[in-house]
Image: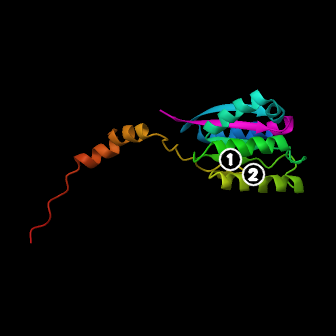
Amino acid sequence: MKAKWSVLVVYEDKDARQLAVQFCDSLVQRFWAEFGFELSWHDWRELEDAAMAEAAGKKACEADLLIVAPSGRNIMQRHVKDWLELTLKQRGDREGVLVGLPGVDETSAISAATQVYLRKLAHESGMDYLTAVPESLMANVPESADAYTQRATQVTSVLDSILRYSPAPPPAP
């Protein structure tokens, strides 16, 4: 059974959404054999509505990947920054990856400042930070004692071969 990754994408505009779609397509193409992906999408304008921001925040708290797709043409809006900072604080110690897409105009000073902000935010939140599809993804670390217990008591083929291995006796002196 494939591990499932929860992905939340928040994007500034239609151009940024298109960049996020390309990123997600590449992510799925690279890892489809190993992982399943559950994707959710929110426009930055939706985050101005309290109910929508709360719903997106709940998804972000559970997401394995949080993708932020700015256009790179505009300074990140205050309500988006506030939402990101609050949401990442609410995640607590939960591991995850914050992906800061470079934006349509990735060479602009605004785009660079946005990347610095997102990298700093990821670091402060204990999350990994990426700007491109990674070469590999690690399977999710279980979050509960029950998950650890289930995994510890599961006999896999590797464990079975170790348990059944009987070494040759040592040579006689």
For the residue pair 44 and 20, the one nearer the viewer reads as: 44
Q: Position of residue 28 (x, y in %)?
A: 64, 37
**Residue 28 seen from this side:** no
Q: Is residue 8 magenta?
A: yes
Is the C terminus in the top left, top right, bottom left or bottom right quadrant? Answer: bottom left
Q: Residue at x 14, y 60 (%)?
A: 169
Q: Residue at x 85, y 52 (%)?
A: 111
Kind of element beneath mark 2? helix
Q: Position of residue 159 (x, y in %)?
A: 31, 45
Q: Identify residue type, mark 1.
A: Leu
Q: How many marks?
A: 2
Residue extending farthest to the top is: 51
Q: Are marks 1 and 2 in contact (CB under 8 Å)?
A: yes
Residues under labels 1 and 2: Cα distance?
A: 8 Å
Residue bounds of the magenta highlight: 1-18
Can you identify the residue that label 1 sits on? Answer: 98
Q: Residue at x 67, y 37 (%)?
A: 60
Kind of element beneath mark 1? strand
Q: Sequence-wise, which precedes: disc 1 or disc 2?
A: 1
For the residue pair 61 and 119, the one nearer the viewer reads as: 61
Taking the image as shown, residue 38 lies to the left or right of residue 103, namely left
Q: Which mark is residue 118?
A: 2
Q: Position of residue 44 (x, y in %)?
A: 82, 36
How packed mark 1 is, by other alpha carbons closer than 10 Å (few <14, some 14-19, many 20 or more), is: many
